[in-house]
Image (cartoon, rainbow, N blue to C red):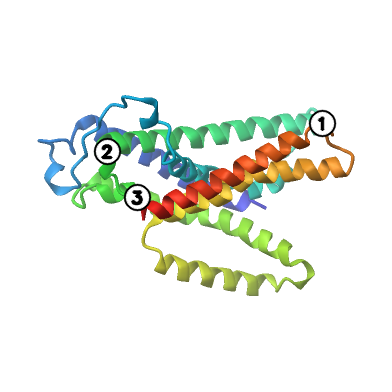
Amino acid sequence: SYASLGFTSVLGLLACFYLAGFVLWRLGDGSYQPGGHFFALAQKPAALLPAKKISDILNLRTLVHLSTCSMIYMNHGMVPSAYAELASTRKTSSQTAKLRRFTKVSVAAFGMVAGIAIVIMSAGFLTFGANSASLLLSSYATSDAGATFARVCALVSVLFSFPINFVILRKEVSSTFGRRAPSQSVLTACLLAIITVLACLITDLGVIQAACGATLGSFIVFIAPGLMERGLCRQGKGDRWRPWWEATVILTGATFGILGVAILLAKK
């Protein structure tokens, strides 16, 4: 049950709201602009040049940004459990009413996440330009008390969202092994050990986000729905006239994933 994680999830969400408010605050007060209080103590903002042609906006490098954005919605694994745990309304317990409530919850949650992400990315980039660090908070001065508290909030957000992500990971790994899966305690220990080692070795978070977004994001958004629809067609439950559409969606996802990773590696 996710009910036990409700309190920590709210704390993590409040931390995200502070992060969004902080980057807007520093963008508005000009502390990191020439002549600002923290200008000499942090990374110098790169000059922002206006786009003069469409290729300045839409190009292959855009795929790297889209790949990173794909990481925003990577909690698809909790959807079935969240739907199962969503209580029905008191007036009716029909599946239709429950689905309506689930739709409202999903739209509110995804909309809130999108809003926070847009604010943080936009305000951070407008503050530091192309000199923005992969981890945005690293761009701010260490003597900035607001940035220090923002780093604490980021820690709180990551720490309190980790249990949800870990439960999803453990459940998916266990279902992959099926009956051969080890006990829950052994699986938990092994996964935690692997995650800890990777966290100690990885130094550039931006590369990992872009790579995971290009591969996993493309798979979840494009490839997986096409494959699932194809499976329904084989069972006689899908639309038989859609095979070309399914193939197009799958190929699009594969293309985005391959190009995203290739461009990311080329930049490095």
Question: What is the CA distance from the residue labelled 1 to the residue labelled 3?
Answer: 44 Å
Relative side of 220 to 197, left or right: right
Question: What is the CA distance from the residue labelled 2 to the residue labelled 3?
Answer: 12 Å
Packing grade of label 3 (10 A; few <14, some 14-19, many >=20) is few
User: Is any part of residue 89 visible from this angle?
Assistant: no
Report the residue that reaches farthest toward the left: 35
Identify the amino acid type marked 3.
Ser
User: Is any part of residue 205 visible from this angle?
Assistant: yes
- Identify residue for label 2: 129
Residue 66 vertical position relative to residue 89 in the rendered view, above or below: below
Provide residue 261's location: percent of width, then percent of height. Answer: 48, 52
Identify the amino acid type marked 2.
Gly
Q: Residue at x 21, y 52 (%)?
A: 142
- Give the camera-side residue of 21 and 217: 217
Marked residue nearer the N-terminal end (1 or 2):
2
- Give the camera-side residue of 240 and 161: 240
Element marked by disc 3: loop
Report the residue that reaches farthest toward the right: 236
- Give the camera-side residue of 263 and 219: 263
Q: Which mark is residue 58?
A: none
Identify the amino acid type marked 1.
Trp
Q: Residue at x 42, y 34 (%)?
A: 118
Labelled pair 2, 3 in contact (Cβ < 8 Å): no
Element marked by disc 1: loop
- Identify residue for label 1: 241
Q: Give the number of the mark in front: 1 or 3.
A: 1
Q: Residue at x 44, y 36 (%)?
A: 116
Q: Quadrant of residue 28?
A: top left
Element marked by disc 2: helix
Provide residue 194's location: percent of width, then percent of height. Answer: 52, 70
Q: Which mark is residue 134?
A: 3
